[in-house]
Amino acid sequence: MALGKVRRITDRMAGEGIYRLVHLGTVANGTTVDMSNSATTASTTAPAVYHFTMPDGRSGTLERVTMLLIDGSIDLTKFGGISALTNGLKMYTETAGGTTITNYTTDVTVKKSGDFVLFAGPDAGMVNELGSTDDTQLIRWTFAKAGQPIKLNSGESFNIAVQDDITSLTEFVAMVQGNYSK
């Protein structure tokens, strides 16, 4: 798949109106594709975009996005253990036609690991230093605590656009959680 195209996700749970855990990124053989592996030449003009799109004929809410960043030595003034990003991560919702509904990063783009605190509060500042192994940063941005859940209608999507090369990170993955019905 060419870089810059939207990577699709699959609904991994059956049933109506149940709690959903949906991976952002391509799901292959039941595993999440790590965002740091597919953003080699990402830029503001050709970002690597990861998204959850509300299935056809359904509407619902996203309650939270959780992210896991793993790298050799995480520093909140850098992005993981690499330099702060030049362009940063863009997080936004858009219509089925590609028009932005809400850009959550208009005023503050995530360029450093510490920037996640501005969205997720103290749930983003936790860095687990594990001695001789990689450090881990856990980010849980609960939309309701930031105002209200994100409402999506059929075909609308929540997106994370990676606008820089982050391939030297050990791992960076995200999931959204929420509910939808017919």
Image: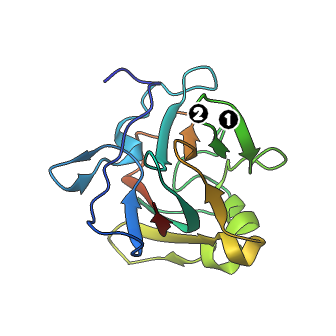
Which residue is the site of mark 2? 163
Decide: few, some or many residues near mark 1? Use Cα within 10 Å; few <14, some 14-19, many ≥20.
some
Q: Residue furthest right?
A: 107
What scheme was used to colour the molecule? rainbow
Is 8 or 138 nearer to us in this picture?
8
Q: Which mark is residue 86?
A: 1
Relative placement, left or right, of 54 versus 106 is: left
Q: Earlier in the sequence, mark 1 or mark 2?
A: 1
The amino acid type of the residue labelled 2 equals Gln
Is the residue under label 2 in contact with that under label 1 (CB below 8 Å)? Answer: yes
Up the image or down, 129 lies above or below 74; here it is below
Please tell me whether mark 2 sits on a helix, a strand or a loop: loop
Q: Residue at x 75, y 72 (%)?
A: 146
Q: Nearer the viewer, mark 1 or mark 2?
A: 2
Give the residue at x 68% y 35%: 86
Residue 81 placement (x, y as % from top left)? 51, 54
Q: Quadrant of the N terminus?
A: top left
Residue drawn at point x = 52 percent, y = 63 percent: 74
C-alpha span from label 1 to label 2: 8 Å
Rendered image quadrant of residue 98:
top right
Would residue 32 appear left or right of 125 to someone viewing this image? left
Q: Looking at the picture, tell me which residue is in the foreground, 129 or 102.
A: 102
Q: In the picture shown, does residue 5 fall above or below 153? A: above
